[in-house]
Image: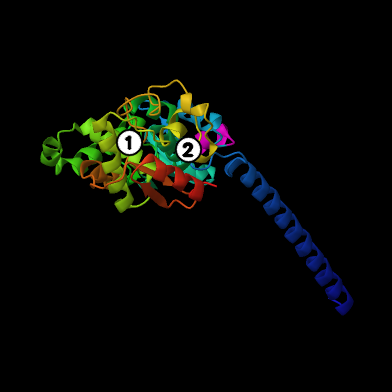
Amino acid sequence: MSQEKFFRNLEFLKKRNVLFKNIFLSSAVVFSAISLFYFGPPGNFPEEHIIGIKEGSSLDEIISVLKKENIIISPFWFKAFSYLSFKERNLVAGDYYFHEKESLLNVLTRLIRGEYGLFAESVTLPEGATASEMGKILKRKFSDFDEAVFVELSGEEGFLFPDTYKFLPNAKPAQVIDALKKNFEEKISEFGEEIKKSGKSLREIIIMASILEKEARTDESRKIISGILWKRIKVGMPLQVDAVFPYIIGKNTFELSLEDLEFDSLYNTYRNLGLPPGAISNPGLSSILAALRPETSPYFFYLSDREGKIHYAEDFEGHKRNKALYLR
């Protein structure tokens, strides 16, 4: 073979190799694109969402749920890989939590292994929150939580103990309520005898505590205000607390008008004597103990300034002076 022919053949082989390489790369790109489209997660994959697979569901029913909930793009490929894995009859039913987007093969693997992805997460329900506010917090934490059912099942305000809890993302309202009420009972149990000796019912203590939770910020001020309010009830004086108004009309102390003070509600402590008919929040232990252990003082009046500091007075004249000084 001549040297010229040898180099011509070499050049041909180089060009052919480049062609094959380009074809291979192009095929790989096309296959990757197809794989990404069919096997990758949909663009509207529902992150931080729970998908329920019912017991006894057929493969087609499972695929229908996954497609409807935007967990997979291609029912065909999901079914094909289910058959290839010989697990089409053994996908595990239950609630699956998808924290982030997952590929078709990851989803299939989880259903084969029954990897639900459910781990208990902490959620803090603050002292003084109402059932409605607790429901909103739980809904923000767990996107599938039924806030409306939670409020509906919560019952009387005041007995859902505020605390930090750990719940699974698929926790049901009834389960959460049960945990909150059990915690309340445990926290209160050691004070049962003391409550009996106080001459007040647990319900009265809780209603007063729910007011104190909103009226004061410190343990000491709660105890003093508790003494003032129980004393007002004893002498037949209206409680006249502003804390009820956010609960009944959504206005705080500094937003109230004289007309608001006449609002027709059994919770309006300006118009009605004694405690309101129910709690206005779910109080923490500090407020409950303040309601149970009021501090005796010479005061009949108090007010809170815009910084939250409490100013006390023994009579109405002193109260008027405090209003002039601290509520300007």
Q: What's the residue at 18%, 33% (across, down)? A: 200
Q: Nearer the viewer, residue 176 or 292?
A: 292
Q: Picture quarter containing residue 59? A: top left
How many C-alpha atoms fall within 10 Å of the one at disc 1: few (<14), some, or many (≥20)? some
Residue 56 x %, y %:
36, 25
Q: Main secondary structure of the magenta part?
A: helix
Q: Nearer the viewer, residue 189 or 55?
A: 189
Q: Residue furthest top?
A: 264
Sequence order check: which comes first, mark 1 or mark 2? Answer: 2
Q: Amino acid at mark 2?
A: Ser
Q: What's the residue at 78%, 63% (across, down)? A: 18
Depth check, mark 1 against mark 2: the one in front is 1
Relative side of 316 to 290, left or right:
right
| Disc 1 from disc 2: Cα separation | 15 Å
Residue 309 x %, y %:
42, 52
Q: Which residues are magenta?
A: 73-85
- What residue is disc 2 on? 143
Q: What's the residue at 62%, 46% (across, down)? A: 35
Q: Give the numbered dot on residue 176.
A: 1
Classify 318 as above or below 208. below
Residue 148 appearing in the image = yes
Residue 159 appearing in the image = no
Q: Picture quarter containing residue 76? A: top right
How many C-alpha atoms fall within 10 Å of the one at disc 2: few (<14), some, or many (≥20)? some
Q: Residue furthest front?
A: 317
CB of mark 1 within 8 Å of CB of mark 2? no
Q: Give the numbered dot on residue 184.
A: none
